[in-house]
Amino acid sequence: MRIVLVGPPGAGKGTQAAFLAKNLSIPHISTGDLFRANISKQTELGKLAKSYMDAGNLVPDEVTIGMAKDRMAQPDAENGFLLDGFPRNVSQAEALDVALKADDVKLDAVLDLEVPEDEVVKRIAGRRICRKDSSHVFHVTYSQPKQEGVCDVCGGQLYQREDDSEDTVRKRLEVYHTQTEPIIDYYRTQGLVVTISALGKVDEVTKRAMDALKGDK
């Protein structure tokens, strides 16, 4: 299957993408991984992207699209892929359609993870990260440490990242509504959108997604 995963920040896209890709035996292609791989391998696209990033500028759509096209052309993506974080806007979605059409393939589904805005804010703004080891993550509601402000694993101080503040989260949501959400309507006109609730336990959401995708086949 060829799937695009869409949803607001805090919807759990990365987590669900990993489980879905494994269950469907297709590669999980995320924008972040694309950039890291191209920059570390010093590909032409990677060098170009880094030049924009080093200058504090946004990487142009055509660079991101070029990376995605190269990744989708690799052997492990021959029978499908799951795109996470791409396309990010309608122009990227249109470019993806053109690229897929050139290879005589098409998307099977666009999975839209739906989460109420207040829940997104609660999920992200409630995160607390360990200063000693950022892989130790807690939550003021869902995964509380035994002692407030102290990491259970190593005793490090827990803090809220600036990116996780409520004001920042709401700004990120505004960007999502303005730039990314319109691709849902774009794909809806093609009959590709499958919307599911991303509320509940991770395995419950995964099962919900798999059931919806099977129905979409």
Image (tube, rainbow, N blue to C red):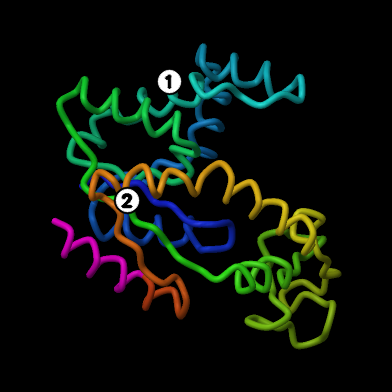
- Identify residue type, mark 2: Val
- In this picture, which residue range is highlighted in magenta? 206-217
- Residue 140 drawn at (x, y percent): 73, 80
Quadrant of residue 35 in the image? top right
Judge whether residue 107 is colored magenta: no
User: Looking at the rendered structure, which numbered label has been put on residue 66?
Assistant: 1
Within-10-Å neighbours for mark 1: few <14, some 14–19, many 20+: some
Give the overall secondary structure of the magenta segment. Answer: helix
Q: Circle 2 — which element?
A: strand
- Residue 59 drawn at (x, y percent): 61, 24
User: Looking at the rendered structure, which numbered label has been put on residue 110?
Assistant: 2
- Answer left or right for 167 relative to 201: right
- Answer left or right for 199 relative to 174: left
- Residue at point 20%, 36% (across, down): 106
- Answer left or right for 125 relative to 211: right
- Residue 38 drawn at (x, y percent): 51, 24
- Residue 53 drawn at (x, y percent): 69, 24
Q: Is 186 above or below relative to 41?
A: below
